[in-house]
């Protein structure tokens, strides 16, 4: 028997980590064909580390999948491919451009055009084509009001839709993963984490994140109080002008709907310090897609969004 | 930042007890409501009321249907932290028809706030919440007598309400009851001590939440229970060759003979070298190693997720339970349990369902409905032909396969189960084992 080692008290991050690992193993055990949605963003970076903790030294019992709008930050795509190669896991890329080319969706036009909404079709088509019955996502309940009520195992009907009024009761840590053919489960291992937890975990685990999360110089234009990255082909509205600013991103989405914040934070510790004193939620500050209406997220989730 | 762990608590209250206002107050006073959320709430407050006063209840008001109907229809989870602790709130509605949500919210909570409106006194609703909290094994009950501002902060009003609820709770196995007079609207005794109730000398609600003892502080108090979730066998998936042992970061450099039993320690403390028994088979072995991605541990305490290696080459699979030989649970096929029925479809004796218990599932028959509890009076009704939605009562269940059971009172993880309807895959009941054989 080993000499007695003083047991360190479990921190809240330890508790959240163990819960998330438990959820991942339950999904792997109870569903036939899971997939992990990896965007290269900080939440799915945490999911990958949790998957390592849950399944190593074996390979992950599922592939990774990225829904690529074609408007993603180049730094993020490069990071995504590097991380996947390091892990030795398999990545599937589902492309919104392919959905457009196949006539499944129609591209929006004009200065406010975004491929954000189109992703839902691409995602659901990919889930159907690969016959996935579970998709891990990095959504957190603190992000938004509709998400605050979503289950850890969130059931989707055969149209990929979420019905907030008929969710299965979720008791203790006994998750019900039973589905019929064509239906699937979205599983959210970090449901109970906050934005700050995610950053503290990234710092604790020394996880690499894409460089756009740190302060950098970028050509941006201001719209609706947010700083959007200038990119080739973007249309400006009257009065908008491109300027160079030091920004970083709090979320990583499509360039067309994700705004940067002015920041000088260049290290993980500085980012964590900034989050602690921030006075605006991450989606409120940086995501145009949630600003469309008071219930924007709820409507998109019902339709099958992430 | 806080490193004194995580407290999960639930709030329950009638529609007008001010539950949403209380949670809004906790979040607002602990500076967890950010500017854009506040702007949304202020905007909504202006639209909804004539005086436009900031309505804190709107902070937690989630889905559109709720906003339209002005009610909370489902369990919502809220997060906040102080320098001392991180909190998860299961915010549960108080209507009778949503008893199932109350049970759901209570299932993971270690503390329950029972809200009482000081003007109305103890309603049946408050008793029901208190009863369900105790039934679900929550060790700490906090009676928050709210709206003290509307009864002139009178001590006698507070004391009468507390006495009545304490009497109601008397026969129930509750560990600790704390009572706090508050005004969620004005914030008295929620985060900031009230100058208007000098007669109250106990903690504010937040002080109590920050200091109450949580189960994770005493993992040694409960016997070891490790339900196996998943068997890790790198060799089975793909063989990359290689040789080093342990949980290597790179799956290509892995020991293909590796065989680890992954799971979350449900209770107790496990140490490398411990003698264990694997149930239901009954094979004995010894813990060869407690693996994690970050290296081997000498010991692990609940609720840590780990991977165990055993000294002997025995057959272990998902659904098996690893525990200590001298404190083993009952391997049972017949359960006596209290269930909360959560489906519109009534439950009748003879109904066949699936049971999910720890990481194990089995077919089950509900052999008998012994009695139904009137949750307002706590009286037992016998001769019941069926359970309807939100009924709570004692049943007998027979299972097709063995389950490793503890009474729910002694172990929430190995004492709790859900029932699933095979016809529509819905979760139709939450169950708490009273006795098993």
Image (cartoon, coloured by chain):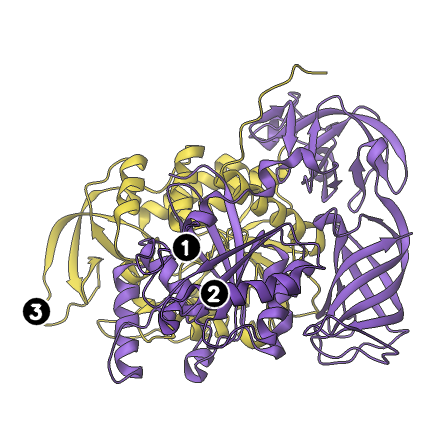
Chain colours: A yellow, B purple
Query: In the image, which is nearer the foreground, mark 2 or mark 3?
Result: 2
Report how far apart the C-alphas of labels 1 and 3 lie in the structure.
60 Å
Q: Nearer the viewer, residue A275 or B90?
A: B90
Q: In the picture shown, does residue A50 fall above or below B240?
A: below
Residue B200 is labelled as: 1
**Residue B173, percent across and down?**
70, 54
Residue at image position (30%, 77%) is: B44
Q: Is residue B357 left or right of residue A148?
A: right
Q: How packed is label 1: few (under 14 Cα within 10 Å), some, or many (20 or more)? A: some
| Quadrant of the image containing the N terminus of chain B | top left
Q: What residue does disc 2 label?
A: B158
Q: In the picture shown, does residue B15 fall above or below A69?
A: below
Report how far apart the C-alphas of labels 1 and 2 lie in the structure.
10 Å
Q: Nearer the viewer, residue A132 or B341?
A: B341
Q: Is residue B27 left or right of residue B124?
A: left
Secondary element under disc 2, as helix, strand or loop, is helix
Q: Is residue B210 left or right of residue B433?
A: left
Callouts 1 and 3 on one subunit: no
**Residue B345, percent across and down?**
75, 80
Callouts 2 and 3 on one subunit: no
Residue contact between numbered discs 2 and 3, judged by CB atoms under 8 Å? no
Residue contact between numbered discs 1 and 3, judged by CB atoms under 8 Å? no
Q: Is residue B338 visible?
A: yes
Which residue is the extreme one toward the front? B156
Q: What residue does disc 3 label?
A: A239
Label 3 chain ID: A
Residue A64 is labelled as: none
**Residue B430, percent across and down?**
72, 64
Report how far apart the C-alphas of labels 2 and 3 lie in the structure.
61 Å
Residue contact between numbered discs 1 and 2, judged by CB atoms under 8 Å? yes
Residue at image position (54%, 28%) is: A8
Quarter of image, res A271: top left
């Amino acid at each position: 028997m080993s000499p007695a080692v003083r047991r360190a008290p479990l921190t809240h991050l330890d508790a959240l980590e163990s819960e998330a690992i438990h959820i991942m193993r339950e999904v792997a055990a109870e569903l036939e064909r899971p997939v992990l949605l990896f965007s290269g963003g900080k939440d799915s970076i945490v999911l990958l580390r949790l998957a390592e903790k849950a399944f190593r030294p074996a390979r992950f019992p599922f592939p990774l999948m990225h829904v690529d709008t074609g408007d993603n930050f180049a730094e993020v795509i490069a990071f995504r491919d590097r991380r996947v190669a390091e892990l030795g896991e398999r990545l599937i890329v589902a492309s919104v451009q392919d959905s457009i080319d196949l006539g499944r969706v129609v591209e929006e036009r004009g200065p406010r055009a975004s491929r954000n909404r189109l992703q839902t079709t691409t995602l659901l088509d990919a889930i159907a084509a690969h016959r996935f019955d579970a998709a891990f996502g990095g959504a957190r309940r603190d992000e938004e009001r509709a998400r605050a009520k979503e289950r850890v195992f969130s059931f989707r009907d055969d149209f990929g839709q979420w019905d907030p009024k008929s969710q299965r009761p979720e008791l203790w840590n006994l998750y019900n993963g039973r589905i019929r053919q064509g239906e699937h489960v979205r599983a959210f291992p970090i449901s109970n984490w906050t934005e700050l937890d995610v950053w503290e975990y990234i710092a604790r685990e020394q996880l690499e994140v894409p460089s756009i999360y740190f302060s950098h110089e970028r050509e941006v234009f201001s719209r609706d109080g947010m700083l959007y990255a200038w990119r080739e082909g973007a249309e400006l509205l009257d009065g908008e002008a491109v300027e160079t600013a030091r920004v970083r991103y709090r979320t990583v989405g499509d360039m067309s709907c994700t705004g940067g914040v002015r920041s000088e934070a260049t290290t993980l510790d500085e980012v964590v310090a900034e989050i602690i004193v921030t006075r605006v939620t991450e989606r409120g500050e940086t995501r145009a897609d949630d600003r469309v209406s008071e219930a924007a997220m709820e409507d998109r989730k019902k339709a099958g969004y992430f | 930042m806080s490193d004194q762990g995580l407290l999960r608590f639930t709030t329950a209250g009638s529609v007008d007890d001010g539950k949403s206002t209380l949670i809004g107050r906790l979040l607002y006073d602990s500076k967890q409501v950010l500017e854009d959320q506040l702007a949304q709430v202020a905007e909504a407050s202006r639209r909804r009321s004539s005086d436009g006063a900031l309505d804190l209840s709107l902070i937690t008001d989630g889905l559109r249907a709720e906003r339209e109907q002005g009610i909370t229809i489902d369990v919502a989870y809220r997060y906040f932290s102080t320098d001392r602790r991180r909190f998860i709130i299961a915010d549960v509605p108080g209507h009778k028809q949503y008893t199932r949500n109350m049970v759901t919210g209570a299932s993971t909570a270690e503390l329950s706030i029972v809200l009482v409106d000081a003007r109305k006194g103890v309603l049946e609703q408050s008793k029901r919440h208190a009863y369900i909290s105790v039934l679900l094994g929550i060790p700490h009950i906090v009676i928050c007598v709210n709206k003290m501002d509307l009864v002139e902060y009178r001590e006698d009003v507070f004391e009468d309400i507390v006495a009545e609820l304490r009497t109601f709770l008397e026969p129930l196995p509750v560990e600790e009851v704390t009572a706090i007079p508050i005004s969620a609207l004005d914030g008295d005794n929620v985060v900031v001590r009230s100058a208007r109730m000098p007669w109250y000398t106990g903690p504010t609600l937040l002080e109590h939440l920050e200091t109450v003892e949580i189960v994770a502080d005493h993992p040694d108090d409960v016997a070891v229970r490790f339900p196996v979730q998943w068997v890790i066998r790198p060799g089975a998936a793909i063989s990359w060759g290689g040789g080093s042992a342990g949980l290597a970061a790179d799956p290509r450099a892995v020991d293909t003979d590796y065989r680890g039993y992954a799971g979350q320690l449900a209770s107790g403390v496990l140490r490398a070298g411990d003698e264990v028994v694997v149930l239901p088979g009954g094979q004995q072995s010894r813990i060869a190693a407690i693996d994690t991605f970050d290296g081997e541990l000498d010991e692990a305490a609940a609720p840590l997720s780990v991977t165990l290696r055993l000294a002997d080459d025995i057959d272990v699979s998902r659904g098996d339970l690893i525990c200590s030989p001298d404190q083993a649970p009952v391997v049972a096929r017949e359960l006596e349990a209290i269930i909360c029925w959560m489906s519109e479809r009534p439950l009748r004796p003879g109904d066949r369902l699936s049971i999910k218990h720890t990481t194990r599932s089995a077919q089950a028959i509900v052999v008998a409905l012994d009695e139904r509890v009137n949750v307002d009076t706590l009286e037992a009704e016998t001769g019941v032909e069926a359970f309807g939605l939100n009924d709570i009562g004692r049943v007998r269940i027979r299972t097709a396969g063995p389950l490793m059971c503890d009474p729910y009172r002694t172990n929430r993880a190995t004492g709790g189960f859900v029932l699933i309807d095979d016809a529509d895959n819905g979760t139709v009941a939450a169950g708490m084992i009273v006795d098993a054989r």
